[in-house]
Amino acid sequence: MKKKLSEDVRDQIEELIAFGKLPPGEHLDETELADRFGVSRTPIREALNQLATAGLVELRARRGAVVAQFTAQQLVEMFEVMGEFEGMCGRLAARRLTDEEQQELVATHEECKAAMAKGGDPDEYYQLNDKFHGVIYRGSHNEFLIEQAWGLRRRLRPYRRLQLRVRGRIPTSLDEHDAIVKAILAGDGDTANELLRSHVMVQGQRFADLVASLPLLKARSAA
C-alpha cells in the first residue's frame, strides 16, 4: 500500500530529528517545512500531529510545534523503561527465535562488525544497531511488546545516536552485542535479559557522558 503524503513527510521529519538536523526544542514552522518538502501545509500539519502522538514533537499553545526535549530525570526514566523492554524482548527471543531469525541475528551482528572494521562511522553503526535490535524485537513474537519497544526507541533516537559518539562506545557496544547473540542462540533467556538491560541503561559514567554531550545536539544542527 502506497504511503500517504503526510506519512512520507512524517518519516522525513523524524529522520531529521533523529540525526540532529532538528534538535530538541527546535521550533517547527509549518510554512518553512512546507517549502522545504515542496508540499502544502495540510500534510505538514498532519505529519506534526502524528509525530506529537508518537512523543517526538510537542504541540504548545501560542508557540506551535517544537521538537520534544527531555530533562535529565526524564531521560533516566525513559532509558530505564527501555532497558526493561529490551530485556523482555531478549528473554522471549531466546525461547522463540526461529532458525531463520537466528541466522538473521547473526548476519546483522556481522554487519555491525563490518561497519566497525571500516572505521566505525557513528551514523552507519547507529542504523545497523537499530536493525540488530529490531531482529530481537521481532524474535519475541509479542506484537504488543514490539510496538511499545519501537515507540520508546523512536522517542529516544536523537539521544541514542548521541551515545554512539562518546569515545569508545561503538567497540563496547559491539562487544555487548556479541555476548547478547551468544546468550540468545544458547536459549539462555535470563542472561539475555540482563545483558540487554545493561546494554541499554544509562547510569553512572555513561549517563554523565550523555548529559555532557547534550549541547552537541544544538551545535551540530547549527553547523
Image (tube, grey):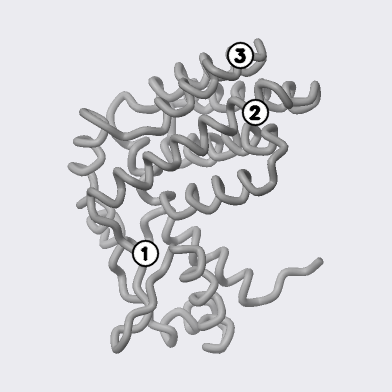
Q: Which circle's residue, 2 or 3, is located before the other in the chain?
A: 2
Q: Which residue is mark 1?
A: 22
Mark 3 packing: few (<14 Cα in 10 Å), some, or many (20+)? some
Frontmost residue, 93 versus 26? 93
Left or right for 164, reference 94: left
From this view, report whether residue 36 is shown above or below residue 175.
below
Q: State the image coordinates of residue 89 (x, y, percent, origin top left).
A: 59, 33
Based on the displayed image, in which of its 4 quarters is residue 201 positioned? top left
Q: Which circle's residue, 1 or 2, is located before the other in the chain?
A: 1
**Amino acid type, label 1:** Leu
State which mark lies toward you, 1 or 2: 2
Left or right for 183, reference 60: right
Q: Which residue is mark 3?
A: 188
User: Mark 1: which secondary structure?
Assistant: loop
From this view, report whether residue 127 is shown above or below residue 175.
below
Q: Are marks 1 and 2 in contact (CB under 8 Å)?
A: no
Q: State the image coordinates of residue 160 (x, y, percent, origin top left).
A: 39, 43
- What's the distance in space between the residues labelled 1 and 3, CA to CA? 41 Å
- What's the distance in space between the residues labelled 1 and 2, CA to CA? 35 Å
Which residue occupies 69% across, 41% down? 142
Q: Which residue is mark 2?
A: 92
Which residue occupies 29% across, 52% down? 74
Q: State the image coordinates of residue 126 (x, y, percent, origin top left).
A: 47, 39
**Amino acid type, label 3:** Asp
Mark 2 packing: few (<14 Cα in 10 Å), some, or many (20+)? many
